Every structure is written in C-alpha cells, then in structure tokens.
Image (tube, coloured by chain):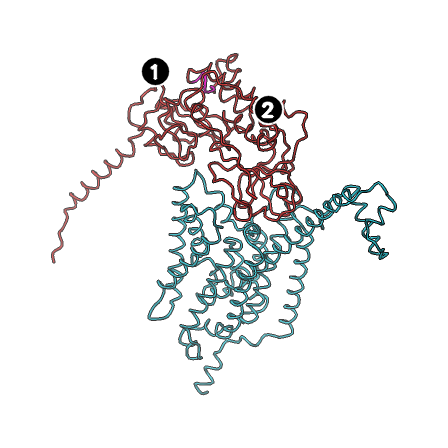
C-alpha cells in the first residue's frame, strides 16, 4: 500500500453517516424548535394564553358597534350607527370609550411584542452559546471547553463593575459588559500566541487564569463599591437573564446579525474544523492552515460568547452540553454538528425561558434566571443521554 | 559557588522557635485576661446594622457610637468601620474597646467569634431580629413587655442604654405619626402602587414586608400584593398585567430622574401601556434611609404619601409629630422631596 493510500485511510470517517437518518434528525429538531417557539408565544409570565383586558360597558358597546359598522359597511361611520340607537351618546363619550379601547389594544400588542422579543433573544442566545461551544471544543481539542472558559463572562462582569465604580449609571450595563469581554479576549489573544500561531493549551491556561483574576477583581470592586453581599444588579446578571428592558429590536437585530455571520463563518470552516481534530502534523499535511483556522475559531467563538453575554449575561452549560448532544445524535462532523447544536441551544434557552414564565404565572415568584433553568433542565437530560457512554472512554 | 550547610540542631531550633511564635500569635485572642465591659460608665457602642445606628441617633446616644459596619448610611459622622455583618474585622472591632456590640440577625444568629468574645466578657453583645414589621421596629426601640418581665433575655435599646424615656418618646412619635397618616387616608380610594427597590431587572417590595405596611399606611395598595416572595422581579408582560397607577422608586441616594427615554433606570417602563407611564406617575424617593426598617419609617411613609397623594401635601405635613427633644441628626436631616419623572 502506498503512503498516499495510508494517509487517505487514516482520514476521519466524518462523511460516512447515513444521510437519511441525519436528515430525519434535522427535520425533527426543526419541528421541535417550531413547537417550543409556538408554546413560548402562548405562555406568558402574567397572562394565561393571550392577554385579556376587561373593558367597560361603554368600550364594549363601541367595539361591537365598530365591528357591526365594518361588517355592514355602514355609510356615515360607526358613531352615527350608535347614535341612531342611543341618542344620549355624545362624541365626547365616544372618544373616551375609544381611548379605553386603544389602551386595551396597546396592552395586547405590548404583551405579544414582549413574548416575541424574548423568544427571538432566547433563540439568538442559544445559537450563539452552542456554536461558540462547538468552535471552542474544536479549537482547544477539549470536550469540557465551553464559551466562558476563556474568561469572557467574568471579563464582562469586571466591565460592569468598573462602569458602576466610575459612576456611569446613565449608561446601560451592556456597554461595560462588552468592553470587559473585548479586553479579556484581547489579552487571551496576545498572551497565547506562540511563534505566530495560537497555542490551544496556552489559550486554555491563559483563559482560566484570567477568569480567576477577573473573578477576584469583581469581588474586590464589589467590596469597595457596595454594601455587604454581592451587588444586586451584578448578582442577578451573573445568574443569566434575558434583558428585555435595555435592549430594543435594533440592538437585537445587530447582535443577531453578528451571530448569523459568525455561524456562517464557522459553517464555511466546518471541513477544516473536522481535520483540525487530528494532530497538528496530520491536519497541516491535509492542507489545513492551522494558524489561520485557530485565529478564526477564537475570534468567532469569543464574539459569539460576548454577544450572548450582552443579551443575557453568562448562561453557563448551554455551550457545553448542546455540542455533546449534537454529537450523540449526529456524530462528530462539524457541518451538521454546528447546525444541530445551534437548534438545540435555541430550544434549550426557549424552554428555560418558557418554564420560568410559566412558574411566575402560576406561583408569582418572579422570573427565575435563565442560567439556573438551563442547568436544571439541561443537566439531567444530558446525563440521561450520556448514560450509555459513561465509563466507556467514548466521549 | 558554596552551599552553606545548616546544622540540624540549628534548623530544629529555628522551627521550634517559629512554631512557638506562631502559637503565641494564634492564642492572642483567647489567652489575654478577659476585660469586663464597663456597662455603668459612658457606653462605647459598635453598631453593625444601619437600622440600629439610626435608632441610636434618634434616641440621642450618637455620641457613644465608636464604630459602625461598612456602608452604614445612618452613621452620623465618619466613624471607624469594622467590616460588615458577613465579614467582621474582629481586630478593628476590639481596637475600639466597645462596651456594647449591637446587631440585627436572621435565623443564622450572631457570628460565633462575636458570641465567644461576648462570653469572655469583652463586651455586651445584643442581637435583635431583622424587623419584619413596624411593630418589630418599635419593639427594638422600646418594649413595654420588658417592664413586666425584668428577666427578659433581650433588652430593647432604650432601657439597655439608659435612655428609656427618650426611646419611648421616639417610639410613640413614630407610631402616632403612622397612625395619623393611616387615619388621613382611611376613607380615600387606594391607588395601586408598585414599590420598586431594584431597576435592572425590576424588583419590587412584595407583601409582608415593612415597606408594604408603610404603603398601606400611606393610602395605597401594593401592586405586587399577589407575589409569593418578599422581593419579586418582573418583566414587561407582568408590569402590563399589574398595570400600576403609580410607580415609586425607592433608591437610596440615587440621582434625580431624567426623562424616561434617557434614564436607563426607567428603561423597563418605556412605552408600556400602563397608567403610571401614561400619566407620568413615576416618582423617585432617594432618601438615604429609604430602605431602612428603622425609626425613620414615619418620614419615609410621609414621603410615600406625598408622592401618592400630592394634592394632600399640606394635610400630610400636619401629621408630623414634633420631636420634644430633637436629636442632633434629626435637626440636621432634611427630608428628600420626591422627584418626579421628567416627561
């Protein structure tokens, strides 16, 4: 056998999955995503199903008259129709009832907007965290890698604390979070370069050490700035929650667009990521530009993690388990793994948010942080899926 | 290069001497002869709870305060800080030579080291339960039950510090002031008010809290009355569902509000179709003591009442019970007027 054939034989068998099975899994995952999204739109944190607004008798009468006028295409308008039957009605009374109707309509629209916003934000956060996890696990060749292992979440926390210390309370905390995450990213990037290329082990160690330093910095700033105990805003932020208060559709579209681009880049590099799981020598001999790939993976993974942090704080676990569940379902091929992980991440965050909303509606306990819900929901599910492989060196 | 050999006997000697020094240092706290506190002379008080500090100021013993806990907003003047209730600096505390250490505790009780030092006679340690109601605050000031039960293990602040009469007056003024406010609004309609104690995310004061009680006194109903926790958080959907008529932001020492579209603290309320937003009824109370369950409650209740019923501001002022012997703090303190949202 020639040397070339040997190399060919040693190539990973990434492309040998049964395509119909993979297609079926994708269809099922997509249907599941649609289902949980539909459920989220129906389950509110306050209202059961759709919001209902109690109307006064006047507003009810005006509403009914307007519908009747619309159905019958009455000329002269709804007021004339009502006035014909109820001569005591004045234009002023009509206007007041209309104000009430408009207010009720605004309420319904606001609730639907809120649910749709949370749903979209949850999907973006899930996608960003899961694909960032896939990327980092490939980059660091470590199955325990997850988006915040490089200290990005704690860096964002430092940014928030510094912002509070400087008294920039009139600026949303996202600015501080983004700055902190970016600075941490830059330090990891500069510290882990070895002969012009990124060293995965160095990156991992730098990230872990930076995470510890950032954690200590948060604590000391917290001690200096605030009263005893962890700063309430920071404590809540660290538990992870979808912030719909300080973000609008523009910001969400921007972050979503960045995540979409990041996902696109990762999909474009999927084949190279497959090969990079081999040794450095093998990957390079198969034509992979390792230095460039590592830089791309690091930057994209960090940007995705930062995007998720800006939208929802540091939600742990999603970036760790979704890639593993994806591998269990579809194998190690990165093209399908990235897509499956993104869908799984979105599903997990949406389910966590829905559960949090449903619990609040039922028990009035406030919205539980998403980070807690993802761990409580995803952890047992992951262990159950992993059960057949535990102790068999197959991870 | 030469390596200097150390004699094994010298090495052991150094080790034994070092260990002895370390042991001596470790034992410093317990081996020293106990010094009994001078309870009858001028008290030297360390307050580990801002609520207690405020009560001490109001009953006129602020001059006896020798140290406070970190971030004590009620401390009358810069005083030594001895850490906080979760992380006490015992060395600093002992350096102030206190006769009394006063603190509020939850179910966990006082820190073990403090109880040990108190048992050794270094100071008198008095712990009071964290107040859950106005009555709890009043009992911490002065408890009539102690008059009939002198053997009572806990002693309220007045009798403890020899200021029984002053404490009784402060308590009476507080309770009478609150009763007058309650009476003023007894027959009026009670608007639904959301008491916000955190803005990102929105965290409110729920039922069964001291501030819930104050709100009722100030002639309003709590929009978060159905919550099952003391400090529930709310998203925009819940805020729409609750539809409060007035939003009161209780943020100690916060900057005044600016227009809702530019103030990040009001971001959660932007564009919400609720009465409070539509009518611009968002009010900030930034009194530094606004969240303290202390003898300042009447003042906070009055600020709430003014914010909720601005048309009755004069009548609310008339409920003010004049202090017979104003404390130094009371003379200098200025009630922060509610700041309304800019539109």
The chain drawn in cyan is A
Q: Residues within 10 Å of mark 1 (few under 14, many from 20)?
A: few
Q: Where residue B315 is drawn, which disc sits there? A: 2
Vertical order, B59 against A278 (above or below): above
Main SS category, magenta section:
helix
Q: Along the horizontal axis of the image, is B210 left or right of A46?
A: left
- Calculate the distance from the C-alpha at mark 2 to the C-alpha at mark 1: 45 Å
Q: Residue furthest top?
A: B148
Q: Please report the residue visible at 52 percent of the width from the left and 44 percent of the height from the top.
A: B258
Q: Chain of mark 2?
A: B
Find chain B in the image and tell me its colour: red
Q: Which residue is mark 1?
A: B41
Tell me which segment is drawn in magenta: B155-160
- Mark 2 vs 1, N-terminal side: 1
In reply to whether residue A130 is colored magenta, the answer given is no
For the residues beneath circles 2 and 1, the answer to whether they share a chain is yes
Vertical order, A41 against A47 (above or below): below
Disc 2 secondary structure class: helix
Question: Splitting the image into 4 quarters, where does residue B310 fall?
Answer: top right
Q: Please report the residue visible at 52 percent of the width from the left and 73 percent of the height from the top.
A: A268
């Amino acid at each position: 056998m020639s040397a070339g054939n040997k190399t060919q034989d040693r190539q990973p068998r990434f492309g040998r999955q049964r395509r119909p099975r993979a297609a079926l899994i994708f269809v099922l995952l997509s249907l599941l995503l649609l289902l949980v999204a539909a459920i989220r739109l129906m389950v509110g944190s306050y209202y059961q199903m759709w919001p209902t607004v109690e109307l006064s008798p006047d507003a009810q009468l005006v509403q009914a008259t307007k519908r009747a006028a619309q159905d019958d295409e009455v000329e002269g308008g709804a007021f004339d129709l009502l006035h014909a039957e109820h001569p005591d009605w004045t234009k002023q009374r009509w206007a007041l009832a209309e104000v009430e109707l408009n207010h009720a309509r605004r309420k319904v629209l606001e609730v639907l907007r809120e649910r749709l916003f949370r749903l979209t934000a949850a999907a973006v956060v899930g996608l960003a965290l899961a694909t960032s996890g896939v990327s980092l696990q490939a980059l660091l060749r470590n199955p325990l890698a997850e988006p915040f292992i490089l200290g990005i979440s704690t860096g964002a926390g430092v940014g928030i604390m510094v912002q509070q210390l400087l008294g920039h309370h009139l600026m949303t905390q996202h600015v501080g979070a983004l700055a902190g995450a970016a600075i941490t990213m830059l330090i990891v990037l500069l510290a882990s370069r070895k002969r012009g290329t990124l060293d995965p082990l160095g990156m991992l160690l730098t990230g872990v050490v930076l995470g510890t330093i950032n954690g200590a910095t948060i604590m000391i700033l917290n001690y200096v700035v605030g009263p005893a105990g962890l700063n309430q805003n920071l404590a809540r932020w660290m538990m992870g929650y979808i912030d719909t208060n300080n973000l609008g559709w523009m910001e969400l579209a921007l972050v979503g667009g960045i995540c979409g681009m990041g996902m696109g880049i990762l999909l474009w590099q999927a084949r190279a990521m497959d090969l990079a799981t081999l040794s450095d020598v093998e990957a390079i001999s198969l034509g992979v530009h390792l230095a460039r790939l590592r830089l791309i993976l690091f930057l994209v993974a960090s940007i995705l993690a930062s995007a998720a942090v800006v939208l929802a704080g540091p939600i742990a676990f999603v970036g760790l388990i979704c890639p593993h569940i994806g591998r269990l379902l579809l194998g190690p091929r990165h093209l399908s793994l990235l897509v499956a992980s993104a869908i799984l991440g979105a599903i997990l965050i949406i389910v966590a948010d829905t559960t949090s909303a449903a619990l609040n509606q039922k028990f009035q306990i406030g919205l539980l942080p998403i980070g807690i819900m993802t761990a409580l929901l995803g952890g047992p599910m992951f262990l159950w899926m992993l059960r057949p492989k535990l102790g068999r060196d197959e991870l | 290069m030469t390596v200097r050999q150390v004699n094994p006997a010298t090495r052991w000697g150094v080790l034994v001497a070092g260990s002895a020094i370390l042991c001596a240092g470790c034992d410093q706290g317990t081996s020293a002869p106990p010094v009994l506190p001078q309870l009858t002379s001028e008290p030297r008080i360390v307050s580990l709870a801002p609520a207690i500090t405020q009560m001490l100021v109001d009953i006129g013993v602020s001059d006896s305060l020798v140290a406070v806990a970190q971030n004590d907003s009620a401390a009358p003047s810069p005083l030594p800080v001895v850490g906080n209730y979760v992380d006490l600096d015992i060395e600093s505390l002992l350096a102030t030579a206190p006769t009394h250490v006063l603190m509020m505790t939850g179910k966990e009780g006082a820190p073990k080291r403090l109880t040990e030092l108190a048992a050794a006679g270094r100071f008198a340690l008095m712990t009071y339960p964290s107040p859950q109601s106005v009555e709890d605050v009043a009992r911490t000031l002065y408890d009539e039950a102690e008059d009939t039960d002198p053997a009572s293990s806990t002693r309220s602040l007045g009798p403890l510090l020899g200021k029984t009469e002053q404490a009784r007056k402060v308590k009476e003024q507080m309770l009478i002031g609150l009763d007058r406010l309650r009476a003023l609004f007894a027959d009026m309609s009670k608007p639904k008010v959301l008491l916000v104690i955190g803005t990102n995310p929105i965290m409110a004061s729920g039922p069964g809290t001291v501030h819930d009680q104050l709100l009722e006194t100030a002639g309003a109903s709590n929009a978060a009355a159905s919550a099952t926790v003391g400090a529930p958080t709310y998203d925009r959907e819940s805020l729409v569902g609750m539809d409060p008529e007035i939003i009161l932001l209780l943020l100690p020492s916060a900057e005044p509000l600016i227009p809702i579209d530019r103030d990040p603290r009001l971001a959660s309320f932007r564009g919400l179709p609720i009465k409070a937003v539509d009518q611009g009824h968002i009010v900030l109370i930034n009194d530094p003591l606004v969240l303290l369950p202390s003898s300042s409650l009447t003042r906070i209740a009055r600020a709430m009442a003014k914010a909720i019923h601005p048309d009755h501001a004069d009548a609310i002022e008339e409920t003010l019970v004049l202090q017979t012997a104003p404390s130094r703090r009371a003379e200098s303190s200025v009630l922060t007027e509610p700041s309304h949202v800019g539109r």
